[in-house]
Amino acid sequence: MKIFDKLIGKKKIKEATVPTSEEQRRAILEKEKAQATKRKEPWVAVLDTQINPDNIRHGFFELDWNNEFIEQLLDAGYKGETNEQIVDSWFKTIAKQILEDQGMDNTRQAGSININRQR
């Protein structure tokens, strides 16, 4: 049968894969980012969170953003040598504000914050 298929040019049809809910979520975020960027509006989103099962104080948030978001942070006074450092500074401010809002000490050691940007 394979020889016959080759002779008449019948190509094997690839089965369509159904995107996972995570793939769908990320595609929606990419579309939102593109739309915001086109409108020259700041955009940031959490793509993923991971917690170290051996040490709950350590984990990471995977963030993505557009250049307009970086410009907004710079205008607000955030500084850094790289975009990742600028976003890290902003994210630490958010984390400290959450602690303060909950009546907790926002100067305590709370693990590390590592900002990873999807490229």
Image (spheres, rainbow, N blue to C red):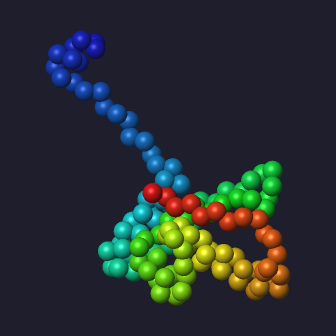
Residue found at the very far left of the displayed protein: 8
Horizontal arrangement in the rendering, residue 85 relative to residue 42 (left or right): right
Depicted 12 relative to depicted 28: above or below: above
Percent position (x, y) of residue 29? Answer: 46, 65
Residue 37 visible in the picture = yes
Looking at the image, which is closer to me, 1 or 40?
40
Q: Residue at x 36, y 68 (%)?
A: 34
Looking at the image, which is closer to me, 80 or 49?
80
Q: Quadrant of the N terminus?
A: top left
Horizontal arrangement in the rendering, residue 16 relative to residue 70 (left or right): left
Percent position (x, y) of residue 84? Answer: 53, 67
Image quarter of residue 13: top left
Q: Residue at x 51, y 50 (%)?
A: 20
Percent position (x, y) of residue 5? Answer: 23, 18
Residue 45 visible in the picture = no
Residue found at the very far front of the displayed protein: 81
Q: Residue at x 54, y 74 (%)?
A: 80
Horizontal arrangement in the rendering, residue 105 relative to residue 81 (left or right): right
Q: Quadrant of the C terminus?
A: bottom left
**Total marks placed:** 0
Image quarter of residue 27: bottom left
